[in-house]
Every structure is written in C-alpha cells, then in structure tokens.
Image: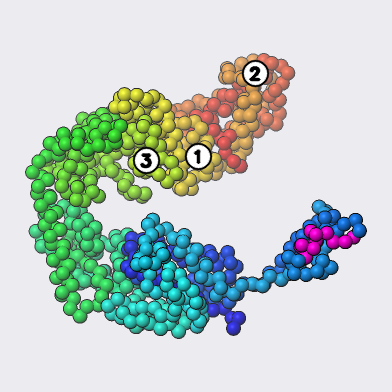
Amino acid sequence: MNEPRDLLIEIGTEELPPTALKRLAIAFHDGVINGLLKAQLNHGKTQWYATPRRLAILVQALVVSQQDNAVQRRGPALKAAFGDDGCATPAALGFAKSCGVAVDDLQRLETVKGAWLVHDLIEKGQQTQQLIPNIIATALDQLPIPKRMRWGALQAEFVRPVHWLVLLFGDEVINAELLSVKSGRETRGHRFHHPQHLYLPEPQDYAPLLETKGHVVADFDVRRTAIRAQIQEAANQLKGKAVIDEALLDEVTSMVEWPAAVTGSFEPRFLQVPPEVLVTTMKTHQKYFHLVDTGGKLLPYFITIANIESTNVAVIRAGNEKVVNPRLVDAEFFWNQDRAVTLESRLESLKTVVFQQKLGSLHDKVQRVAKLARCIAKDLGHDEQQAGRAGLLSKCDLMTDMVAEFPSLQGIMGRYYALHDKEQKDIAEALDEQYKPRFAGDALPQTAVGQALAVADKLDTLSGIFAIQQIPSGDKDPFALRRAALGVLRIIIEQKLDLDLKKTLELSAQYAVDQLKNGNASSIAQQCYDFMMERLRAYYLDSGTTADVFESVLVLRPAQPFDFDERIRAVSGFRRLPEAESLSAANKRIANILKKTCYRDLTINDSLLQHEAEKYLAEQLAKITSRVNPLFAKRQYQQALKVLAQLKEPVDQFFDDVMVMTDNEAQKNNRLALLGRLRSLFLQVADLSRLQN
C-alpha cells in the first residue's frame, strides 16, 4: 500500500477561451507540480492535458505520504529553565508541557553560543491524499485569469463554469470539493460523439479511454500535430500548399476535441481583392487556413477544422462557404469604395482623430513625421521629398473603411491605395514599411523612404510621449515605446544607417515642444536616448554580448547606433586576443592613476623621457598612433584594436620598470601625459578598463 501511485486531476468545464487554453493548462500544471515540490512529495514524469472542456494533469509514481522528519524544538536557555535551587522554572515547565513530556525527558543542547533545553521528536509525514486538495486549490488561485466568473448561486469563481472534477490517486478517489464540485472518477467524452460519463479505473487509463471511447484527443500537442497533418493532406488533395500560422494552429487546437479537416472554396472573383484582405478575413473571423499555389499566389480554397466527425461533410462545407461569402462581399465592397477617393484627399479628415490629447490630432502627428522624415532622408543622402510625401500620407489609410474593419491591415492597405493613386512605388512601399518591425524578429523596412519614415514615426511617438512625461513604468507601456525604441535601433544597426540618433532625437523633441508650447527639447532628447540605451542593452545581452563589453562602449555615449555596433563587435573581438587581459588590466591601472590626479595636459616632452622603458613606450605609441588614426577615421575599430594590441609589450615593460608618481614633478607630469595619450587612444573605441578579466 505504500508503493507510489499515479495521480490524475481533471477539471471539466464549459468551453474555455481558446486563446488562453494552452497558457492556463501549463500554468495549472506548473502550479500543481510546484505545490508537490514544496510539500516534498516526490514523483515521476508529469503530463498536462487540455481541450476546450477540460484541464488535466497526470503525475506518475507519486509517493503516498511525506517522509517522517526528525525535528528538534528548542526551548528556554538553561539559565532561564532552572532556578538557583535547581528546580524547573515556569518557562521549563511550560515548554515541557507543550512538547507533551516531563521536564526530565527533555534534552540539553550546548553550543559555543550557550545552552538550551531541547526536545527531539519525529514529525510524522502527512498523507498525500490529505495534501492534494489544498495544493490544487492554491494552483487554481494562482492561474492567470484576468476576470473570474460565478455561475448560478455558487460562490466558486473560475474562468468558466465547472461541471465535473476527477481526483484519482491510484485506484482510489480523493474525496474533496473544489470550485463547488465534488470529486469523482468519471470523466466525460465528446459533447456530441460521446456525451455519457466514462468510468476511469486508474489514472493511466485517462488519455487512451477518452480517445478510444470518448472521441476526445486530450493531449494538446498530439491534437495539434494531427490537425497539422490533416491540413497538409487536405491541401495536397486540392493541389495547393496550406499556409499554417502557428498562432492560429494553437487557437484552432484549443477549439476542438476531435478534429476533422474540411475543405471549402469561395468565388474566384474575390481574388481581385488584395490577398492580405482575404487572408485576414478568413483567419480572423473564420479561423480558416488559406492555400497558395507553387508561386505563392492565393487560391480560392480554405481549410477549416470541425469538432465533429460528420457523416455528411458536404453540409459542413456548405455551411462554412455560406458564412464566409458575406464577409468576402463586404471586403470587396470596402476595397471598391475606398479606391473611389485618393489617400491624399483623406489627409484633412485626420484632424478629427486625436493621437494624444496634448500632442494633438493624427494630422498634427503626420506633419511632424513628414518634417522629421525629410531631415532623416537628407542626412542619409536619400530623396527628402519622397520621405516628406510618405510622411504626409502615412496615416491616411486609417480613415478607410477597410482599415476600420481590419485594423491589422494598416499600412498594407495604404500601400495598395497609394499604388492605385499612382504614387511613386517607394512612397507606397514606405506606407507599409513604416510599421516594421511589427514584432520581435519581424522583417525591417528595405526601401530608403521606408527606413526614414519608420524611424521618424517611432521617434515622434517616443519624444512626444516623453515630452508629456508619460514614461513607461513596470509593465505599463500603452504607446508601445519599448517596441518603438528597439525597432528604431534595429533599423539603424541592422540596415547600417549612418544616422546620428542624438541629433535626430533633438530635432524630434523640438517638434514636440513646438506642439506643446513648452518643454526643454535637449532634456527630452536625453531622456529618450537613455531609455533607448536600456533597450539597446537588452538587445545585445540577448544576442550574447556580455554586460562589461556593452558598458565599455556605452560610457562613451556614441551618437550613432551603427557606430555603437561597430565598437561592440570590435571589443568582443579584442577580448579573444591573447593581449586582451593584460591591456584591459593596464587600462584599469591607467584610469585609476589619472583619476587620482587632476592632470589633463597630454603634451609629451621628449627631453624628459629618461628611462628606456618610457622612451620605448613613447616611440611605439607614436608609431601606433599614425597607423590607427586612419582606421579610426574609417571606423575600422576591429583592425584598430588589433594594432593597439601590439602595445602590450611596451606597456608591460613601462609598468615593470618605471615609477610614474616620482618626486620629480616635471617627470611625473610627463609620464602622466604619456599614459593619458595612451588611454585616449584606446578611448577612440571603448573604455577597456570596464572589461572584466
């Protein structure tokens, strides 16, 4: 009877929110397993299950009770336990009573810190069955449920009404009541295929029994894999390729218990509408998977996943086609209506939409963005007129019926409508690219106009929101400033744009100040720069750059992110050189020496160089300087640091043989000047004194 047993927990509910199902299941599993860990209940493998109507956990080889623990209770100090006559004091008597023994049965503990009365006992471990209900209740309380609901007259609160509860430990039911439902050993099958109860002999029977008799694939990952295979098979039969969006696949997996792929079609005339519109319609509203041909062109078919194995699939197909058709008709109508007027003609209507109360309307924003985009394009040597034009048109598609219906198509529809209006191709592309990168790992804008517009749009939002002091804090970031900051940095660095971020921020902040009629543009720009540097820190740390390498460059406050990146790469490469450790240590030593003095004059007097080691260093320093200055001018920092690494020998020799802080004031200052010149040379790249050995 003391052998470990399997534990099954199942909570049966009304249909759970599909977008939250997987997250809830994993959180429930982790909460229970953490509870077992805290209770010191050892177990074997675990498995979570999730369908629209159930959350379940299988824990294999769970011990039947906690281990007994040896516990030592410490009582009063001996001085307080016994009086001068050797009799037990009330303190000793009270402690003995609390332990359930006589004073004479207590032990004594003597340490260097003193002596105490103690009582040694064996604390009996609790039975697992007694602990499980509280462990589950705690896990349920900690689930990430934004808004819990009640049902009927019950006091229980959960994400959906609960109908049954299985708590099976081996072949025994753990008697408990959770979420106003009493536990049992009966689960339920598919709502239509097998609505009857299913008797569970043991936990291991759970998944096989549900699948064979209940028409329920309880394992989320197994169900997901099956759906993918069915979609691909259905696509092959239609001689197309299914485009499987992983997030949509997760959502659909969360909506069915017994998946069955069903194909359908729509009228080919709808293919005249931009494919993004059709795909968004099918994915967002209908949860369909679309198909493309070998060239990537959209086909007039779709695949849906039914939650029933129908004997008359034609009825399901006809129903889905009937539902999607009106939506495609609406999309076609919006497409035709929106093209009846130009994007430019919608510019005036942007005055009716507030961007932010203090920062004005969308019309105000596009005016600022257009000016900033022109300046950015000019600085990068691109067509500033195109950038300005793209800035003015950048938000006009927000006033179209299509984007009002499908907000995720902002920018994409702007591109289509701009092309229809005969705008230049790069301007049209920029209207889409302004929002890139939309998410982590997303593609970056490729056109020069798109890059200028994307940077301008994001910096305008950043500087404007900072100007009104709505700086993100904690997890609150309503204007997505963190994403905007990282997007700008990625564009500049990964597209190798030679853009002065500090100067551009100053300009953007000034436009915001002009709008607000108050504020300090320099201060706002500095705040934005510091905020962006924190995003840049995360960017590099995530890519494997160490914190000290980042700090060695950050301390110089480079104005250009691409230049910052070149320095990071150079320092990372320098650390792999055999001379790196010695030279970084020397930089630390030099920095400390110069910091303790107020010496700033870098003029070296050759006549004061007396020692061979300092002459040698001065000579090598002069030679190296002439070699690295052209490299610095070209920002070839990696090559420059390789050349500077040749100073290891003269620097080591200098510190071995020369006393810097000599009593001769002129000689001391000359040596400080020599070290200052050396340090300033390295500081052309980074502060190597920040590197950790």
Describe the element under mark 2 as helix, strand or loop.
Answer: helix
Left or right: where does residue 667 sit relative to residue 230?
Answer: right
Tag 1: Cα neighbours inside 10 Å, few (<14), some, or many (≥20)? many
The kind of residue on which mark 3 rests is Leu
Q: Which residue is tagged 2?
A: 669
Q: Which residues are magenta?
A: 86-96
Left or right: where does residue 109 sit relative to residue 204?
Answer: right
The kind of residue on which mark 1 rests is Phe
Whether residue 377 can be seen here: no
- Placement of the C terminus among the 4 image quadrants: top right
Label ID, residue 550: 1
Describe the element under mark 1 as helix, strand or loop.
Answer: helix
The image quadrant of residue 431 is top left
- At which x and y percent is residue 124? 67, 72
- At which x and y percent is residue 14? 33, 69
The kind of residue on which mark 2 rests is Asn
- Placement of the N terminus among the 4 image quadrants: bottom right
